């Protein structure tokens, strides 16, 4: 059988893969025949993901690193390259609203913005630099995938920093794609809306989750595997001529002008 994805026997590194959609990405890469380096700030959950990866009959490597700190991530990427060989795919899944409760702009301090920048844009910057430098050294064609959000395309009351930095991830994807194209490294981005993983249930009430579910044309909230599937597609040879793009894995929400967007109160997190 032909390996249509072109990934079997090659190596991926997924940053922020200790749980949720990052774990689903690591597992899907493994099921596609890739060895996977699993990076997370939480070593225990990274090891749990690696156990699932290895159960697919490929190699896994658990690495603890803080993706906000470039030297820390650099060490993890070097260890992955050393243990597995040239990296073909790099994914940054780290990202969240920021370290503070949501609030209207008039009530926000700059520290809310700074943590959103660090956790979303800075982690993409660090993954881009550390992984693509290895790919260039190894002279292998590669693929980078970032995770943005519907919030990067549309207004989200009380989450201004998150929306602004996710818009930044989408734009960064375009510029980086142009800069890395001469090295045959493609750069793309997946834009989810709500994902039915741990973060959603930690941050939003069940009533708010239900309202989001009702707003999605496909009639359900994305599973972690839905997001992982879009990432796999962009990482694979099937997307070999696709770069600089953001694929919205959002059940169609971004297509409609009738999105019952979250009201200002509703968007307040618990
Ligand atoms: N969950 C949603 O509803 C949703 C919606 C739209 C977009 N997204 C985006 O999808 C991505 C993943 O979201 P998720 O819900 O799966 O997240 P999550 O919080 O469930 O998982 C993120 C993982 O990254 C790890 N991590 C966090 N900070 C880190 C750091 N500095 N260094 C290394 N590891 C770190 C965590 O330990 C965790 O294992 C994020 O970029 C998020 O912004 C999520």
Image: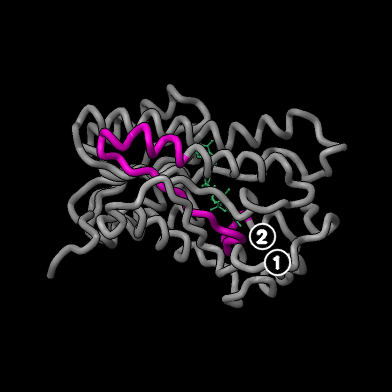
Determine if the C-beta at disc 1 is less than 8 A from ligand 1: no
Which range is magenta? 173-199
Instruction: Classify the position of the N terminus by image quarter.
Output: bottom left
* Front residue of 197 and 108: 108
Q: Residues within 10 Å of mark 1 (few under 14, many from 20)?
A: some
Residue drawn at (74%, 39%) of the image: 100
User: Can see residue 217?
Assistant: yes
Q: CA distance from mark 1 to mark 2?
A: 8 Å
Q: Tell me which label, 1 or 2, sits earlier in the chain.
A: 2
Q: Is residue 213 magenta?
A: no
Residue occupied by mark 1: 209
Residue drawn at (69%, 38%) of the image: 99
User: Can see residue 43?
Assistant: no
Residue occupied by mark 2: 201
Q: In this image, 184 relative to 125: left or right?
A: left
Residue drawn at (31%, 56%) of the image: 239
Q: Quarter of the image holding residue 150?
A: bottom right
Residue 131 appears at what percent x and percent y?
A: 34, 33
Residue drawn at (14%, 66%) of the image: 2
Q: Is residue 182 magenta?
A: yes
User: Quick check: marks 1 and 2 in contact, CB under 8 Å?
Assistant: yes
Q: In this image, 182 relative to 99: left or right?
A: left
Residue 232 appears at what percent x and percent y?
A: 35, 57
Residue 88's place in the image compared with 57, above or below, is above
* Front residue of 65 and 127: 127
Q: Residues within 10 Å of mark 2 (few under 14, many from 20)?
A: few
Residue 142 appears at what percent x and percent y?
A: 27, 42
């Amino acid at each position: 059988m032909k390996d249509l994805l072109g990934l079997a026997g090659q190596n991926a590194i997924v940053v922020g893969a200790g749980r949720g959609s990052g774990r689903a990405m690591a597992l899907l890469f493994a099921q596609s025949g890739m060895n996977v380096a699993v990076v997370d700030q939480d070593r225990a959950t990274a090891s749990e993901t690696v156990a699932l990866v290895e159960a697919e009959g490929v190699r896994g490597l658990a690495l603890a690193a803080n993706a906000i700190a470039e030297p820390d991530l650099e060490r993890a990427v070097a260890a992955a390259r050393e243990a597995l060989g040239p990296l073909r795919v790099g994914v940054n899944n780290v990202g969240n609203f920021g370290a503070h409760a949501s609030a209207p702009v008039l009530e926000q301090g700059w520290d809310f913005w700074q943590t959103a920048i660090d956790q979303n844009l800075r982690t993409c910057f660090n993954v881009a630099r550390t992984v693509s430098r290895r790919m260039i050294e190894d002279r292998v064609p590669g693929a980078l995938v970032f995770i943005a959000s519907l919030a990067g395309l549309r207004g989200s009351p009380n989450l201004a920093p998150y929306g602004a930095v996710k818009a930044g991830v989408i734009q960064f994807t375009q510029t980086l794609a142009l800069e890395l194209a001469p090295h045959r490294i493609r750069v793309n981005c997946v834009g989810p809306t709500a994902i039915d993983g741990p973060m959603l249930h930690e941050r939003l009430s069940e009533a708010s989750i239900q309202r989001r579910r009702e707003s999605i044309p496909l009639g359900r909230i994305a599973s972690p595997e839905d997001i992982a599937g879009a990432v796999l597609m962009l990482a694979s040879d099937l997307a070999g001529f696709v770069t600089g793009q953001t694929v919205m894995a959002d059940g169609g929400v971004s297509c409609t002008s009738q999105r019952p967007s979250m009201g200002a109160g509703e968007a307040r997190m618990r």
